[in-house]
Amino acid sequence: MGLITANTIITSVSLFHLTLAFFFLTNPKTVDDQALVFFLGESMGVPYARGFDTPSAPLGLLSAVLALLGISDLVSLSMPEEIGMIYYWGPQAPLRSLFSTALLLYTFLSGPSSSIFTPPSTRHFSRDPTSMGGTGSGGALRNRVFFTFMFFETISWFWVWVTLREERNALIDKLKKTRQAQRD
């Protein structure tokens, strides 16, 4: 069993979602100005996005969705351990990890630094700060903030998934002992 439990990781991710919701609602530039967002974006060749300069209606919607997600995840942790960890988070963690990984790969592979999905005329990396990484379907997902968010979501939910698999056996043994004690 690891040093950090799945409950602790899920609580941390939920509080991270609530924190992002607050900043996207009040001052989204704070998130965009983080050094980690800059370094991950530069190292992976993901373009800068201007949409995080001031609060806007889409960022307000994003804030509400992140707040709902964070609060619902925190509330789900109050369920009985055997129900929450086995039946709720057991399927949720791999699904969220897979979805986050798919969006992370989409953002990276469809950006201007990718030679896979971009047209030949746009294969060079644009240092233009007004560049949103292309237009059309999913163009708004090609930015540093989204890439960094999905990077941390992928890492976090994969960690939750692995930790849950480790804790599941201990929880099942504990339930067997409890049931055996009740029978005796």
Image (tube, rainbow, N blue to C red):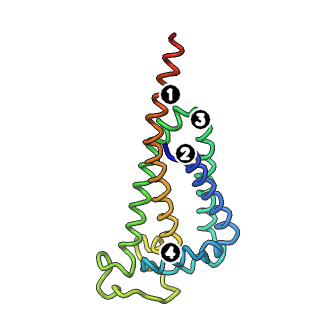
Where residue 124 sits, quadrant-wise, is bottom left
- Tell me the residue that label 2 is attached to: 5
Where residue 5 sits, quadrant-wise, is top right
Query: What's the CA distance linking mark 4 and mark 3?
Result: 36 Å
Q: Which mark is residue 38?
A: none
Q: Are marks 1 and 4 in contact (CB under 8 Å)?
A: no
| Neighbourhood count class around disc 3 (C-alpha, 10 Å): few under 14, some 14–19, many 20 upward | few
Query: What's the CA distance linking mark 4 and mark 2?
Result: 30 Å
Indicate the position of residue 121 as horizontal and vertical percent values. 32, 88
Q: Which mark is residue 79?
A: 3
- Tell me the residue that label 4 is attached to: 144
Query: Is 24 placed left or right of 128 in the picture?
Result: right
- Tell me the residue that label 1 is attached to: 174
Nearer the observer, disc 3 or disc 1? 1
Which is more N-terminal, label 1 or label 3? Answer: 3
Q: Are marks 4 and 2 in contact (CB under 8 Å)?
A: no
Query: Helix, strand or loop at disc 2?
Result: loop
Q: Amino acid at mark 1?
A: Lys
Q: Are marks 4 and 3 in contact (CB under 8 Å)?
A: no
Which is more N-terminal, label 3 or label 2? Answer: 2
